[in-house]
Amino acid sequence: MNNIFSSIDRHFTFQDGFLPIKILAGERAFEMIAPQRTSMIFGITDAPWSAAAYQVNELLVQLESNLNEWDLIAIAASGRARLVRHNAVVYELQCTIPPDVTGLHSNFFYRCPECNGHIYECTHLLISDRDRHEPSPSGRIPSEVTTCPECGGPIQSLGPGVSFCLDCDWECGLAPIN
């Protein structure tokens, strides 16, 4: 997990410039990052003598019991969030998590809004390279064609979490027209 971060000017960044100010970490990830801490440990969890949070320079690292033990969620000041697995696989979450959140009460971040599958079993939110998330030269988001769950026809993707079937009325993530 350490290889996804680079320490630059007292901050942690991802290779594509994503700059988290807070990390919500599963138990093992929390313990693995702990030797890098630069602040006093503060807060106590339900487990006796267990730290709830610490800082690594300007990055707040907080224990999150709703995450798998080796996973972490990196949160930027804007609320953009990424789920990071211990094998350095990174998922761009399609939800906003305020950096001042003190704890998550759900595991919604493990579900893909595009296919409703477990995030580890789909590729919709997977960050494999930078080009995938940059607009094409024409200014449009590259489309991904998959199979419609209702009729088996091709699906046109308009962006993360927004797609429709080219053969029937099935759609996902589109607001109804009133």
Image: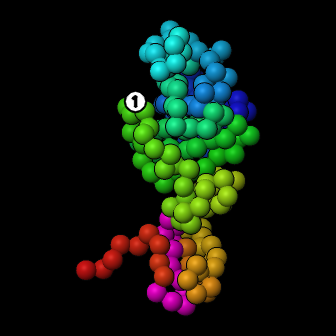
State the residue at coordinates (62%, 73%): 144
Residue 7 visible at all: no
- In the displayed structure, would residue 157 be above or below residue 78? below
> Residue 174's quadrant in the figure?
bottom left
Residue at (40, 30) in percent of width and height: 102
Let me know if residue 164 is in the magenta part: yes
The spot of residue 88 in percent (x, y) is 71, 40
Residue 53: percent from the left, percent from the top? 49, 20
Q: Where residue 22 sits: x, y (%)?
A: 49, 30
For the view shown, which residue lies furthest in the bottom direction? 167
Q: Is residue 99 left or right of residue 3?
A: left
Residue 5 is inside the magenta segment: no
Q: Which of the image's four quarters has the N terminus? A: top right
How many numbered marks are there? 1
Say if 135 sits above or below 145 in the image.
above
Name the residue rendered at 52%, 18% in the picture: 47
Q: Amino acid at mark 1?
A: Thr
Considering the image in quadrants, where does the C terminus appear?
A: bottom left
Q: Secondary structure at mark 1?
A: loop
Residue at coordinates 67% horizontally, 41% vertically from top-left? 85
Residue of label 1:
102
Q: Where in the figure is residue 72, as x and y percent of width and height?
A: 59, 36
Q: Nearer the viewer, residue 106 or 161?
A: 106
The magenta region covers 158-169
Colouring method of the image: rainbow
**Camera-side residue: 38 or 107?**
107
Whether residue 90 appears in this view of the structure is yes
Vertical relation: 175 (above or below) 13: below
